[in-house]
């Protein structure tokens, strides 16, 4: 080998050993997988709207840097998972874009998940994209489950790891990623959607007789789960199962100050039947399951179960299933399920969901 050739060989070896630099991937890249309710705002920005709505993507390399922003100028929260392992809940303050660099455990491939910890009314989490060495496709899951509900399904008042109960704002103890629905779905290797709003019921809300505030049937078909009907939810993907847990707020006595009428079984049942018909209009082949409430007991629970059975019996040509919790799980803030309670709820539901999904 000639001496003049040696420097060329050295340079080739040097560049071949050097790892390539990271590349910026916008949030609208086709290899990013979105779940839940979300909206493409521009070619570079995507809004995560509903509880536990998410952006998932699989990258190569030993690190990744994500760019996120809160639409709520006070603060908001999101969760990061790596390879379906919970990392932490992050707090976003102000409305500036925040840069977060993560070390990844494997160089070959790592699935990164960004999940909104709060609900739709808390304002959007804006995902701008990420820097990574390479982006590859993310595996699809065999099932999709939609969980419809209230604050329980949102994972509200469950996580007081950063701010104690009865301190801060309502959003400060939200952690939708650790709520029973996402926990259950991950165990079943299923994708999930949470269509849930705190305080809402089927015919009335926690402290309103459907006079000043909308109920779930009035917001469900709107993208942002509010009264803005100018943006409709697309219902593009049919869930294999729709789980409904609504009744806690209908059964509530309210704050004891505002006028509260006795629970109206007929109205609750009628609204529930109409709502299930709405579900079938969008998802004609889905399996509907009805849950009572882990926050209701005694005579109220007996009445609630009776109403759910009447809803089930109305649909002669559909095999609707009912699950009954037999204990209260209310060890979180303000008589709500805690993170540990949500784990227990998911554990109790698992055999039932497996049987319904034929797993």
Image: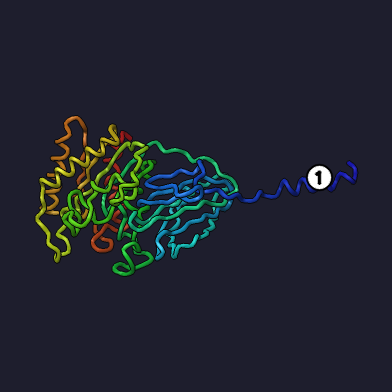
Vertical arrangement, residue 352 with respect to residue 90, above or below: above
**How many numbered marks appear?**
1
Instruction: Tell me the residue at 17%/44% (across/down).
Output: 271
Measured as percent of width and height from the top left, residue 77 is found at 40, 59
Q: Which residue is mark 1?
A: 9
Q: Quarter-wise, where is residue 350 in the image?
A: top left
Q: Please state, as top left, top right, bottom left or bottom right, where the N terminus lies in the image.
A: top right
Measured as percent of width and height from the top left, residue 348 is found at 27, 47
Identify the colour scheme used.
Answer: rainbow
Measured as percent of width and height from the top left, residue 253 is found at 14, 59
Q: Please state, as top left, top right, bottom left or bottom right, where the C terminus lies in the image.
A: top left
Q: Nearer the viewer, residue 265 or 234?
A: 234
Instruction: Tell me the residue at 40%/61% (across/down).
Output: 72
Vertical arrangement, residue 251 with respect to residue 322, above or below: below
Check the image and name the residue furthest to the top. 317
Q: Nearer the viewer, residue 32 or 301?
A: 32
Measured as percent of width and height from the top left, residue 148 is found at 28, 46
Mark 1 element type: helix
Q: Nearer the viewer, residue 281 or 246?
A: 281
Binning the other alpha carbons within 10 Å of mark 1 as few (below 14), some (14 to 19) or many (20 upward) gives few
Vertical arrangement, residue 216 with respect to residue 288, above or below: below
Check the image and name the residue furthest to the bottom. 167
């Amino acid at each position: 080998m000639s001496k003049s050739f040696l420097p060329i060989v050295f340079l080739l070896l040097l560049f071949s050993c050097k790892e390539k630099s990271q590349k910026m991937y916008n949030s609208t890249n086709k290899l990013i997988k979105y779940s839940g309710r979300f909206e493409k705002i521009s070619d570079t920005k995507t809004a995560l709207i509903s509880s536990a709505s998410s952006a998932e993507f699989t990258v190569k390399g030993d690190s990744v840097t994500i760019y996120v922003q809160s639409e709520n100028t006070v603060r908001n929260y999101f969760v990061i998972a790596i390879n379906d392992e919970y990392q932490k809940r992050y707090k976003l303050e102000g409305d500036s874009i925040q840069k977060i660099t993560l070390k990844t455990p494997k160089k070959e491939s790592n699935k990164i998940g960004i999940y909104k910890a709060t609900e739709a009314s808390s304002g959007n989490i804006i995902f701008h994209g990420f820097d990574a060495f390479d982006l590859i496709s993310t595996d699809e899951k065999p099932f999709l489950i939609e969980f419809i509900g209230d604050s329980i399904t949102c994972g509200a008042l469950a996580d007081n790891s950063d701010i104690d109960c009865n301190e801060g704002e309502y959003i400060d103890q939200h952690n939708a990623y650790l709520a029973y629905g996402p926990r259950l779905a991950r165990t079943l290797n299923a994708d999930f959607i949470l269509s849930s709003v705190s305080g809402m019921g089927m015919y009335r809300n926690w402290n309103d007789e459907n006079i000043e505030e909308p109920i779930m049937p009035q917001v469900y078909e709107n993208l942002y789960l509010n009264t803005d009907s100018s943006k409709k939810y697309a219902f593009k993907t049919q869930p294999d199962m729709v789980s409904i847990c609504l009744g806690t707020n209908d059964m509530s006595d309210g704050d004891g100050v505002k006028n509260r009428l006795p629970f109206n079984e007929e109205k609750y049942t009628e609204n529930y039947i109409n709502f299930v018909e709405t579900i079938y209009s969008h998802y004609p082949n889905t399996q509907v399951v009805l849950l009572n409430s882990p926050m209701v007991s005694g005579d109220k629970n007996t009445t609630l179960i009776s109403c759910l059975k009447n809803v089930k019996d109305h649909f002669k040509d559909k095999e609707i299933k009912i699950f009954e919790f037999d204990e209260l799980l209310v060890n979180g803030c303000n008589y709500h399920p805690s993170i540990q309670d949500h784990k227990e709820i998911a554990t109790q539901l698992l055999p039932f969901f497996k049987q319904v999904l034929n797993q």
